[in-house]
Image: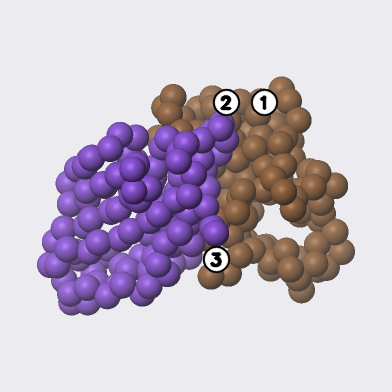
């Protein structure tokens, strides 16, 4: 499995501001994913980020709110824009490796919006 | 109906017992099935995956898949207090590319 890091690990932000979360992988991967995990809930996929193409967003998530960049095969960013307290959550990136559908997760970013 | 369903628990078992975690899914075209363990405050960790009907064993863990009945289970033998965590079932829904759909998770408590 790949080694995945995320920055920042946690942050407290004011409403109306934006935060960019970075995800770095120690090997080249084609597919990266961004998830949200709200308190006490399971994981919800925000978008799939493939290098060289626009991210694909799931129902309920839009590019204006969650812009994603994927400049190369080892790095991606997710921005949470114009934040409100409802955006308080853990944001996780994952990668698919090994040729199958297995996904491995980064350590997550815990975001609190006040 | 949710696409992937799990009993939220908590499931409480004594140390040394077998813990049995179940997951049902709605899409018959699903191909791949995964179990993740998530400790409180940590990210999910992949512990098992299974693609074919039957059993797959890895140490104390056994994944069981029954596509006809649309369920997948995880057995943990000789349960330890360190196994106490939330276990997430994830399914690659047919036609969804590499996307995974997660169940709500089952909280397991192993009591010494």
Residue under mark 1: which chain is it in?
A
Residue B13 located left or right of residue B39? left
Q: Residue at x 39, y 42 (%)?
A: B33
Disc 1 to disc 3, how far (Cα)? 29 Å
x, y percentage for residue A59? 72, 48
Indicate which label's residue lies in the foreground, 2 or 3. 3
Locate residue B88, reporting x and y percent.
Answer: 42, 56
Q: Earlier in the sequence, mark 2 or mark 3?
A: 2
**Residue B92 visible in the shown view:** no
Numbered disc 2: secondary structure: loop
Numbered circle sitting on residue A30: 2
CA gap between label 2 and label 3 equals 28 Å
- In this image, B17 relative to A12: left or right? left
Residue located 67% across and 42% down the image: A47
Residue annotated with mark 1: A51
Residue A52: image quadrant is top right
In the figure, B106 relative to B23: above or below? below
Chain letter, colour brown: A
Give the SS element for disc 1: loop
Mark before the other along the chain sequence, 2 or 1: 2
Q: Position of residue A45 (x, y in %)?
A: 61, 48
Q: Quadrant of the N terminus of chain B?
A: bottom right
Left or right, B67 with reference to B91 = left
Dot label at residue B29: none
Colouring method of the image: by chain
Q: Are marks 1 and 3 on the same chain?
A: yes
Q: Position of residue A68 (x, y in %)?
A: 74, 40
Can you tell which chain is drawn purple? B
Label 2 close to label 3 by CB (< 8 Å): no
Numbered circle sitting on residue A41:
3
């Amino acid at each position: 499995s790949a080694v995945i890091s995320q920055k920042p690990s946690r942050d407290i932000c004011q409403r109306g501001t934006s935060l960019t979360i970075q995800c770095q992988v120690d090997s080249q991967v084609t597919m990266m994913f961004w998830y949200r995990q709200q308190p006490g809930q399971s994981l919800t996929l925000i978008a799939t980020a493939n290098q060289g193409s626009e991210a694909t967003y799931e129902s309920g998530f839009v590019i204006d709110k969650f812009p994603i960049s994927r400049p190369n095969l080892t790095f991606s960013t997710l921005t949470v824009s114009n934040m409100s307290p409802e955006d308080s959550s853990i944001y996780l990136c994952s990668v698919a490796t090994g040729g199958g559908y297995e996904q491995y997760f980064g350590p997550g970013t815990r975001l609190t919006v006040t | 109906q949710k696409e992937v369903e799990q009993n939220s628990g908590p499931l409480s078992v004594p140390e040394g017992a077998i813990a049995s975690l179940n997951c049902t899914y709605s899409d018959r075209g699903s191909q791949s099935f995964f179990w993740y363990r998530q400790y409180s405050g940590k990210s999910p960790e992949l512990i098992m995956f299974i693609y074919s009907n039957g059993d797959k064993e890895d140490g104390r863990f056994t994944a069981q898949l029954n596509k006809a009945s649309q369920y997948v289970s995880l057995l943990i033998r000789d349960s330890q207090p360190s196994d106490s965590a939330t276990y997430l079932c994830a399914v690659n829904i047919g036609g969804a590319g590499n996307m995974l759909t997660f169940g709500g998770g089952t909280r397991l408590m192993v009591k010494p």
